[in-house]
Image: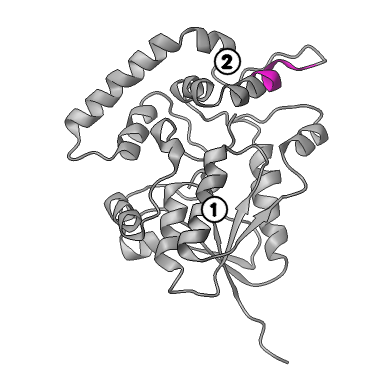
Amino acid sequence: MAEKRTRHILGLSGGKDSTALAVLLHREIPEMEYFFCDTHKELPETYDYLDRIKARLGIKIHYLSENRGFDHWLAIHDGLLPSPQMRWCTVKMKIKPLEDFVGDDEAISYIGIRADEHRDGYISTKPNITPVFPFKERGLVRADIIRLFEESGIGLPGYYRWRSRSGCFFCFFQRKYEWVMLAQEHPDLFQKAVKYETNHADGRIYTWTDGESLLLLLARKDEIIAQHEKLMAKEKKTAFNPHLAEALDKSLNQEKDDLPCLVCHL
């Protein structure tokens, strides 16, 4: 009987760390299988960025969950929107599609967590999926990731001008500034997020962010933008040669302490 092969898989989120990992490994592991868990609620910039990655690296990306996106699972959950306390979106649209993609095959899953990060990503409880962390193993930190981007010519996702991570346009881990900028950059998507927040036939009350509705938040947009600009100026003043994405991430991290689901945001 022929020995069963081990698959090599790498999940792309549309963020900088998973993309940098693909840059690092695409020549080292030519048999790598790249996948993206598509919620059908991603930013347009994310889909554009995935196209750029495919073209630049010459790789194929498997789009998982093509037929069962967010609205399908929202109906299954009787209209109960996901939250930091109930992250069914991660389970149903990120983890389960990955496990279905692998099936019973032995697989090595390559995860883009850097050596300068003190966190672990959710991989899978399935014993046939083995996580590895190449950045940690090689001691690669944020500066190394930026260098990989510069050398590859791919660049950073367009949303990094105003948003620190990838993920659904209505992700409940967004900071208030990011919600305000969503309204500015994609007013149609902001209105869809408002509709999700308010469209509850049973009268339940839900807000995407900290007990404040999106419309009330938007009414304070000048205050929120001014506070953000103050934090950005402080970061740029204290950091040595700060990169835009790094300064944005640090300033936004001062606003909210909740950690996002790493499976969505690497």
Name the dominant secondary structure of the magenta segment: helix
**Residue drawn at point x = 74 percent, y = 27 percent:** 80
CA gap, disc 2 to disc 1? 31 Å
Q: Is residue 83 above or below residue 104?
A: above
Residue type beneath disc 1: Asp
- Which disc is residue 41 wearing? none
Residue type beneath disc 2: Leu
**Residue drawn at point x = 38 percent, y = 47 percent:** 118
- Return the x and y of residue 195 as percentages of the image width and height: 69, 19
- The residue tagged 1 is 51
- The residue tagged 2 is 214
**Residue drawn at point x = 40 percent, y = 46 percent:** 156
Residue 163 within the magenta-colored segment of the rendering: no
The answer to whether residue 97 is left or right of residue 226 is right
- Return the x and y of residue 133 as percentages of the image width and height: 44, 61
- Return the x and y of residue 222 as percentages of the image width and height: 40, 10
- Visible in this render: residue 196? yes
- Visible in this render: residue 264? no
The secondary structure type at the circle numbered 1 is helix
Q: Determine the image quadrant of residue 75.
A: top right
Q: Looking at this view, name the residue that lies furthest to the front.
A: 55
Q: Is residue 5 above or below residue 169?
A: below
Q: Residues within 10 Å of mark 1 (few under 14, many from 20)?
A: some
- Return the x and y of residue 120 as percentages of the image width and height: 47, 50
Count of numbered circles on the image = 2
Q: Earlier in the sequence, mark 2 or mark 1?
A: 1
Quadrant of the frame with the N terminus: bottom right
In magenta, the rendered stretch is 194-200
Depth order, front residue of 23/49: 49
